[in-house]
Image (cartoon, rainbow, N blue to C red):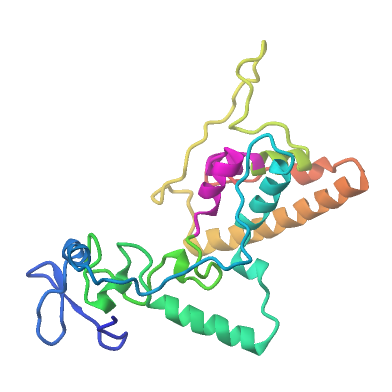
Amino acid sequence: MQRYSLDRLPVWDDQVSAWVDPDTREPLTPWHVALDAIDDDPDTEPVHVVRFGVQVDARGVMPGTEDAERTIRYVTKYITKQTGDCHKITSGRQRAHLDRLWQELQVTPCTDRCANWLLYGVQPKKAHAKLKPGRCKGKVHQRDTLGIGGRRILISRDWSGKTLADHKHDARAWVRALLGVTTDSTTIDTQADNPEPVHHAWELARPDDADVGPMSHRLMRAISERARWRTQLLAAKDRAAQGTTPDLSATDQTTTNGEEQ
C-alpha cells in the first residue's frame, strides 16, 4: 500500500544514512526486512495478478522445424520496435488510457533498486540520497517503452544467437556495404600478404585536448553530420532499390577531434 505521495516524500538522513519518515524521522523499512516480512506472513497475497486468457496459444520455437525461421523473423521484428511504433494512438479514448497507465507506472516500483519503493515505506536495495521517487529512469516508466523492461536486444540473443555488439557490427557492415565503403580504421586486413600500411593513430579525444571545441559547437556539428549521413543513406537505399551504381562521393569519412564519426 502506498504510504507517501509525490508532494509528501520521505527524506534522507545523513546521520543514519537512510530514508526516514518526514514527520516521525523513523527510518523506513530496510529492503531485506521487507522481504522477510513477506516470507513470514502466510496470508500475503500479490497486489497484481496477470493471467493468460483462453485465446493465448503459446508455442515454443523448435530448431529445425518448418516455422522456425519465419517465427524468429516475426519475433525479432517487434522486439526491436518502440511501443509507440507498434501501437499507434487513433482516438481520444486510447490517449486517455495511455495517460492513465503512464501516470500509474510513474509511481509503481520496477526493480529492487527503484526509487518508487520509498512511496511504499520501503528503502530500495542499495538506497542512496540521490533517489527521486516518481522520476525513475527505468524504461518501464518511459512513455515510449511503457511497461516494457527495455532489454529487447539482449533477450533476442536467445532467438538469434547474437549479442548487442554483434547487432551493432551487422548494422555498421550493412551501412558501409550500401555506401560502397570497404575498409576503415577497425577493419584493415593485417593478415594479407601485403597488408595496407596504417598511416593514422586513432584515439578518443579528451575534454582537456586543445583541439576540442566548446560543447555547443560539437553538438551542432554532430547534428549537422547526422542529418547529412541520413540523407546519404536514404539516397544510397534508393539507388540500391533501382539497381544503379553507388555514388562513391557519398562515402567521404569525417574526422572530428581525433575520432571517426
Residue 18 percent across, percent down from the top left = 14, 69
Q: Residue furthest top?
A: 193
Please state the extent of the stretch shown in magenta in the rendering: 150-170
Which residue occupies the foreground of this view, 56 or 181? Answer: 56
Residue depicted at 76% across the width and 51% down the height: 233
Horizontal side of 151 relative to 28 (left or right) equals right
Identify whether 51 is placed above or below 59: below
Which residue occupies the foreground of this view, 215 or 154? Answer: 154
Which residue occupies the foreground of this view, 49 or 143? Answer: 49
Residue depicted at 19% across the width and 78% down the height: 11
Horizontal side of 157 relative to 63 (left or right) equals left
Decide whether the magenta segment is chiefly helix, strand or loop: helix
Identify whether 109 is placed above or below 97: above
Q: Is 167 included in the stretch rendered in magenta?
A: yes
Horizontal side of 118 relative to 136 (left or right) equals left
Residue depicted at 8% across the width and 68% down the height: 16
Identify whether 201 is placed above or below 194: below
Q: Is residue 157 visible?
A: yes
Residue 155 percent across, percent down from the top left = 52, 49
Which residue occupies the foreground of this view, 121 or 20? Answer: 121
Q: Is residue 259 visible?
A: no
Number of marks: 0
Residue depicted at 61% across the width and 51% down the height: 59
Q: Quadrant of the N terminus?
A: bottom left
Q: Is 29 included in the stretch rendered in magenta?
A: no
Residue 178 percent across, percent down from the top left = 77, 42
